[in-house]
Amino acid sequence: MTGSITPDGTITLSSGVKIPQLGFGVYQSPPEVTSKTVLAALDAGYKHIDSAYWYFNEEQVGSAIKDSKYPRQSIFITTKLGLADGITGLLDDSVAKIDPTPEGYVDLFLIHSPSAGPEKRKEQWKALEDLVKSGKAKTIGVSNYGVKHLEQMEEYAVTPPAVNQIELHPWCQQPSIVAYCQSHNIALEAYSPLVQGTKAQDPTLTRIAEETGKSWAQVLIRWSLQRGFIPLPKSDTKERIIANRDVFDFELSDAQMQALNALDKDEHVCLNHTELP
């Protein structure tokens, strides 16, 4: 994987597809505000939108992109499979919601969780591989997968996962999963990179924010970028959407990165699926 930390920086995935390194998440964005939120993000310069079947807002993401002034091919869109049964129909349905054109596609399709169990995970992955063959997905990956889930995939995946999207921030660094993914050329997407605001008063974080003249949120996003992750901050507030992208005019020093790296407590703010059987 290659990339550079610039406003338009991308990472080249193992599949050859280029993904914008800074993404924008719409988790918990209510359907009635999602289109407005996505349009604000696109206008702020984001070119990477992350949705999912279980967010119940894929259709609104698609509407926003259709109604925007930006061509479809300039926007990288991710969604995720959330169920174990009726897999092919669910995949096609998600694509149709996001890009309802005859040539509709998503750029990245992920399995949302390993919760379906070993046999169903294999079935889900084959369906995603078929989706790529059909042209409805450019590349595929997983989310919330632990090392054992990824190791199992080596036995059946014709196409290896290009991405693993997991919870990543200074308090939850998941080093064993990160090391495995990095050694297997699997890009790491960081969800909840802002720790859902729960660490805004952390003394180490506030000190570094003061030193850099940036907000605590901007420091966390910059940390994620400098670690080589693909952070997916989310907000429905226009000012925060803009501010969360204003992270390319400063750099965290080695000492500041080390101070943030030292905060790891394996502390999750979301359900931890990486330990599922």
Image: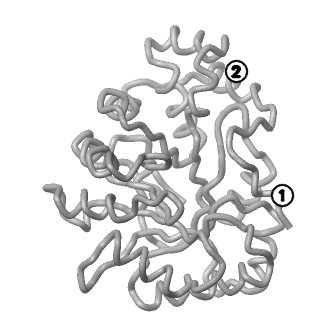
Helix, strand or loop at label 2? It is helix
**Mark found first going from the N terminus, 1 or 2:** 2
Query: In the image, what residue type sits under mark 2?
Result: Ala
- Residue 89 pos. (x, y %): 49, 86
Vertical side of 37 occupied by 89: above or below? below
Residue 240, percent from left and from top? 37, 29
* Horizontal side of residue 45 vs 203, given as left or right: left
Q: Name the residue: 30% across, 60% down.
A: 75
Q: Residue at x 66, y 19 (%)?
A: 255
Height in image: 123 above or below 43? Answer: below
Q: Nearer the viewer, mark 1 or mark 2?
A: 1
Splitting the image into 4 quarters, where does residue 173 fall? Answer: top right
Task: Name the secondary structure under disc 1.
Answer: loop
Other-residue count near label 1 (Cα within 10 Å), few / some / many at <14 / 14–19 / ≥20: few
Can you name the residue that lies furthest to the left here? 69
The residue tagged 2 is: 259
Q: Determine the CA span between mark 1 and mark 2.
A: 28 Å
Residue matched to label 1: 275
The spot of residue 224 in percent (x, y) is: 56, 38
Q: Residue at x 86, y 67 (%)?
A: 277
Q: In the rendering, at what x and y percent does residue 58 appear?
A: 39, 63
Asked whether 43 or 183 is in front, the reply is 43
**Could you say which disc has been placed on residue 220 in the image?**
none
Which residue is drawn at the image coordinates 46% and 90% (left, top)? 133
